[in-house]
Image (tube, rainbow, N blue to C red):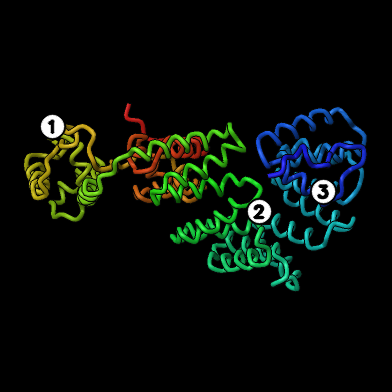
């Protein structure tokens, strides 16, 4: 990896670099934490300059580090040129002002930006705005680039991905990777799709291709580490995380991930015990409706939000009998059901931490929140590791996740503090949290 300081490119020099060199600066800026700090210092020194030429360089620099609002403001006063409007479009898109971004891209094309670059950036912008017909129309206008341009096939794949056409998307990612073997984005999305499809070997191959490049791809390396860890190859998992930490020594998620991997090396996993617990969980998740009960008993249990056998293990006889219309006859029916499974009322309360995950019926939520609770955990855009652990725990919706405790999540093999913090942050963004027993 070539340090930025050794490259004879200064975005803020008297003469603005060429468009190609500006794009390279964007790559170099994010080569390492040290390069980011160096560039931030250069940017800070240039912020006081306000001429149209300086505003162009500062605006581009702000855009490269993701400070989109400031970038748009500075670029508005910059000298008119193709780079101004191209990076103004990026800034506007980062602010989700998609219509204005399209206008800026149109202006950039008129001033000399490569027509394919402008067209593909428009496709990406329309996709982000979820205007799929407009994106398809612009792609169709560039059909002559089929089997010629890697970027054309990459953007086509991203559009198909957004539309749920995953097989077609993978085909286009593969064509993009074949046309340009170092197209990091195409390789990443190809790897991620294979991972989601369960083909971990193929996913690892593509993540390794990315990891072999000169630029450190944090997401690819951490996903690769997850796959290595799942395969029990903890040394390679550590090496992947170490490569991230070598470039970004203060990366909080990588630091926590490193600790999790070290813990996994000494973690004992009792496969027979896990199998027994899984069988018990299946029993406890059996719905009450599967058993023959009197109408009175069934209605009483329903009103008490008791849906499964596991729910009965978390309630005592006295609590049942205290409920209106629930008498000795109903109690006897319930006991008979539990005895047939070698269980009894209040069993979970007596045994302390029970092996089965709790599947309590949640308290009623406001109607406005019901849509959030019904969302799948896939919509939360979690890392591969967190997603796999939730799959193992059969937690499919946000609502199910909010009824789970930290201890239950941490009890899953390979689920560590990194994944827990990621999930807690994702829930907090939705105004939700994990279940608290305190």
Q: Is residue 323 above or below residue 143?
A: above
Name of the residue lying farthest toward the top: 438
What is the crowding at mark 1: few (fewer than 14 residues within 10 Å), some, or many (at least 20)? few
Which residue is pictured at 16% across the width and 32% down the height?
A: 350
Sequence-wise first label, 3 or 1 = 3
Query: Marks 3/1: CA distance?
Result: 76 Å
> Percent x, y for residue 302?
23, 45
Contact, CB < 8 Å: mark 1 with mark 2? no
Sequence-wise first label, 2 or 3 = 3
Q: Secondary structure under badge 2?
A: helix
184 horizontally vs 109: left or right? left
Q: Secondary structure under badge 3?
A: helix
Query: Marks 2/3: CA distance?
Result: 27 Å
Asked whether the viewer can see residue 211, the reply is yes
- Name the one closer to the observer, 435 or 190: 190
Q: How many numbered markers are drawn?
A: 3
Which residue is pictured at 89% across the width and 41% down the height?
A: 78
Contact, CB < 8 Å: mark 3 with mark 1? no
298 horizontally vs 102: left or right? left
Sequence-wise first label, 1 or 2 = 2
Query: Marks 1/2: CA distance?
Result: 57 Å
198 horizontally vs 98: left or right? left
Q: Quadrant of the C terminus?
A: top left
Contact, CB < 8 Å: mark 2 with mark 3? no
> Percent x, y for residue 133?
67, 65
> Percent x, y for residue 369?
46, 42
Q: Secondary structure under badge 1?
A: helix
What is the crowding at mark 3: few (fewer than 14 residues within 10 Å), some, or many (at least 20)? some
Q: Which residue was labeled with disc 1?
A: 318
| Circle on res. 128 | 2
Q: Which residue was labeled with disc 3?
A: 21
């Amino acid at each position: 990896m070539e340090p930025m300081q050794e490259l004879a490119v200064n975005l803020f020099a008297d003469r603005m670099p060429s468009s190609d060199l500006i794009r390279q600066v964007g790559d170099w800026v994010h080569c390492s934490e040290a390069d980011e700090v160096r560039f931030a210092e250069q940017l800070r020194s240039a912020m006081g300059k306000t001429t149209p030429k300086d505003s162009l360089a500062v605006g581009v620099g702000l855009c490269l580090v993701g400070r989109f609002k400031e970038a748009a403001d500075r670029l508005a006063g910059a000298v008119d040129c193709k780079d101004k409007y191209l990076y103004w479009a990026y800034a506007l898109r980062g602010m989700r002002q998609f219509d204005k971004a399209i206008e800026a891209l149109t202006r950039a094309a008129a001033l000399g930006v490569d027509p394919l670059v402008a067209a593909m950036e428009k496709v990406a912008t329309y996709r982000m705005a979820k205007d799929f017909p407009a994106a398809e129309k612009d792609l169709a206008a560039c059909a002559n680039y089929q089997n010629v341009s890697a970027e054309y096939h990459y953007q086509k794949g991203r559009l198909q991905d957004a539309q749920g056409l995953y097989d077609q998307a993978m085909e286009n990612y593969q064509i993009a990777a074949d046309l340009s073997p170092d197209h990091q984005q195409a390789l990443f999305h190809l790897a991620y799709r294979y991972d989601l499809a369960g083909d971990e070997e193929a996913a690892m191959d593509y993540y390794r291709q990315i990891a072999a490049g000169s630029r450190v791809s944090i997401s690819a390396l951490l996903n690769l580490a997850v796959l290595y860890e799942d395969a029990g190859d903890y040394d390679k998992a550590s090496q992947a995380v170490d490569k991230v930490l070598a470039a970004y020594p203060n990366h909080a998620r990588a630091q926590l991930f490193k600790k999790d991997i070290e813990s996994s090396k000494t973690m004992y996993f009792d496969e027979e015990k896990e199998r027994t617990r899984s069988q018990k969980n299946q029993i406890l998740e059996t719905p009450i409706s599967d058993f023959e009960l009197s109408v009175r008993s069934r209605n009483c249990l329903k009103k008490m939000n008791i849906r499964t056998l596991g729910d009965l293990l978390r309630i005592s006889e006295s609590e049942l009998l205290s409920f209106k219309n629930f008498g000795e006859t109903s109690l006897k029916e319930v006991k008979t059901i539990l005895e047939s499974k070698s269980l009894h009322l209040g069993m979970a309360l007596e045994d302390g931490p029970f092996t089965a995950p709790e599947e309590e019926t949640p308290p009623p939520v406001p109607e406005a929140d019901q849509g959030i609770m019904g969302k799948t955990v896939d919509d939360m855009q979690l890392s591969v590791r967190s997603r796999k652990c939730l799959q193992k725990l059969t937690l499919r919706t946000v609502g199910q996740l909010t009824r789970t405790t930290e201890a239950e999540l941490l009890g899953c093999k390979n689920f560590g503090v990194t994944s827990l913090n990621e999930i807690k942050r994702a829930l907090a963004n939705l105004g939700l949290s994990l279940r608290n027993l305190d």
